Amino acid sequence: MITIITPTFNREVLVQSTIRSIQQQTYTDWELIIVDDGSTDNTEHVLKSYLTDSRIRYIRKSNSGQADSLNTGAAQAKGEFITFLDSDDEAYPNWLQTVAAGIKEDTGILCVGAIRKFPDGSRVQEGMNVFHFFGQTFFLKFTCGSLFIRRSLFEVVRGYDASLKSNIQTDLGYRLLVHLRESKMNAVVINEYLVQINIHQGERIRTNWKRRREGGIQFIEKHYGFIYEHDKKEIANIYSVIAHSSYKLRQRQESVKYLFKAIRHNPVRWINYMRMVKYALL
């Protein structure tokens, strides 16, 4: 069995498309756990009709954020593998079938590609991201819907860090990589685009600049030593995101400060010098 965990908050319309995409899977040995993070709209009412499907469970709790909702769902999971699918995204019909066929006895995590769909109907394919750790190059993707985790492994790394304001997926991914190396389990990559990330005008972490800034600072403080040892350029990328988020919040002094940090860790990335002018003057 594969367990899908979907956290939701005030998405009474969007979450229904997510549920239907799971019900349309060609692979049928799954369970869906919907964790309602204290919605104040009609979510609970509209979901009642879907609960006639015995594979779907609904958990309602007080509002405590996405990471805590994901952990809550995982604690109730029965599947050998778990994955997380946001309540505004959709899975293509062969999502689970393709994943199940790729799982081996020593598989710890499995990653698939995604397609980002924009409001104008255009689509962009998102393949694996590059990570440089332990003297190796890994091509993996830690985003919701793309990452499948052996449930026992998720429990060993103690799930998501609910104290982080953002970057919870990458934080989990880093800890999974460390444990994979120690346990001799492997990562499987399937270079197919099997989930759809729907971009819309509603709230998303990607456009919540305050949370992205605070979460970025938390993340770099937590993992600075680990990243510095393996991939200094990634530190520069994280500082660049913090700088951009600060700029969006009209905190020019802070944006320039973090951009200086980015340049210090990767001085050959010329675009940061152009950003320096923009953040300081425009």
Image (cartoon, rainbow, N blue to C red):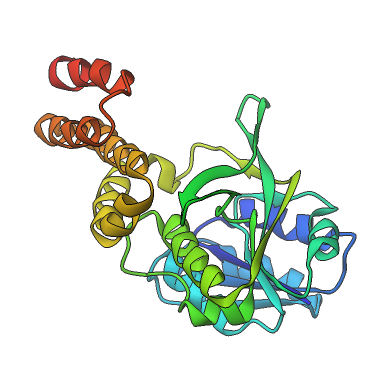
Front-most of residues 120 and 75: 75
Q: Is residue 88 above or below residue 117?
A: below
Please name the residue shown 60% across and 31% down the image: 118
| Relative to 234, 275 lies left or right | left
| Relative to 209, 260 lies left or right | left
Name the outermost residue toward the left.
253
| Relative to 122, 104 lies left or right | right
Please name the residue shown 32% across and 43% down the image: 232
Please name the residue shown 54% across and 68% down the image: 181
Q: Image quarter for residue 11?
A: bottom right
Rendered location of residue 10, percent (x, y): 50, 58
Q: Image quarter for residue 270?
A: top left
Q: State which quarter of the image contains the N terminus.
A: bottom right
Visible residue check, residue 215: no
Number of disc labels: 0
Q: State which quarter of the image contains the C terminus.
A: top left
Q: Image quarter for residue 271?
A: top left
Rendered location of residue 212, percent (x, y): 32, 47
